[in-house]
Amino acid sequence: MNLARSHGPFRSAGLLSTFLLAFAFCLLPFSFPALQAQSSTADILQVKFYYDAVEFEKAISTGREILTSGQTFAPDELLFLHRYVALSYYNIGQLDSARTHFLSLLSVDPRYELDPVTVSPKIIDFFNDIKKDYQALAGGGPALAYTRYVFVEDLRPGAGWRSMILPGWGQFYKQQKTRGYILGGAFWGSLLATGISLLQESAARDKYLERSTPEDIERAYSDYDQWHKTRQALVIATAASWAVAVGDALWSPYSRASLAARPEGGVLLTLQIQF
């Protein structure tokens, strides 16, 4: 019986380390969107750099390029871009274009105020007049040609906690049914296989402890050891599939409607399909 106690140890520390490495490896691909976001922020700040350097044409061209790039922006980023593009247009005398971007800025934040410390009183007066026009438009006045923004809720945070509880649920929440079937099926299949292997390991261990002759012990231990290793591998596979499902729900892009309101009140809808 001493032999029975000396074989087949559960290497908990090694298993935990392997799990953590697998978890980190599975989340690595999802760090790329964060790197791309940092690059986008640098491009946005470039617009202010050109404006401060009195290179208004470059500020305008860079800002317009970013705004038409199809990226997803936070409200603060839209305010920043339209502010400096509008100010640049004003400084080169293109007041209609400045007006258009100020109106787009107000569609993001109707209560926006320019800083009198950094902006001249003349521009502030111009902006305040536009603000009155915007309020008239909101009250049913004559239509003005500018881009209005309609913000769509980002489903990824909600998808993330759903997949933490039930892998695959977050993908269905994002309307990514194919991913939900694949990632959810991988997790639940691995979990089921882990449960089966645990039962087989337990049964093999009982048989191993019941054997008395060296030959039977060796044969029974080989069977037990195989199920033990199989169960360990399946535990890691289950943990990894859970990590992938959560990471995918939190960070992967998904099909989102991009809405831009027309000046006459209609809504232009474009749909980006991303698997």
Image: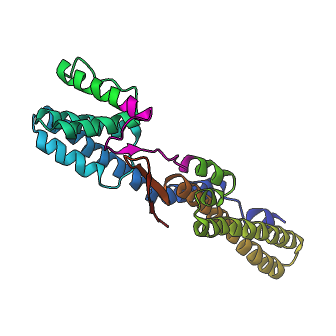
Q: Quadrant of residue 243?
A: bottom right
**Camera sees residue 228:** no
Direction from residue 14 to residue 221 in the image, left or right: right
Q: Is residue 237 magenta?
A: no
Q: Give the range drawn in magenta.
A: 134-157
Residue pictured at 27% horizontal, 39% vertical: 101
Q: Kindly tell me whether residue 198 is visible in this rendering.
A: yes
Asked whether 155 falls inside the magenta stretch, the response is: yes
Q: Could you tell me which residue is drawn at 76 percent across and 70 percent down?
A: 197
Where is residue 57 drawn, in percent x and y?
12, 43
Where does the N terminus fall, quadrant-wise?
A: bottom right
Residue 71 sits above or below residue 220 on the image:
above
Asked if residue 48 lies left or right of residue 198, the reply is left
Spot occupied by residue 216 in the image (x, y as percentages of width and height):
83, 80
Measured as percent of width and height from the top left, residue 157 is found at 56, 46
By secondary structure, the bulk of the magenta-drawn segment is best described as: loop
Residue positioned 29% across, 53% down in the render: 68
Q: Which of 240 and 248 is in front in this view?
A: 248
Q: Does 191 sit left or right of 147 as displayed? A: right
In front: 32, or 139? 139
Residue at figure coordinates x 80%, y 77% from the top left: 220
Vertical order, 58 against 216 (above or below): above
Q: Quadrant of residue 47?
A: top left
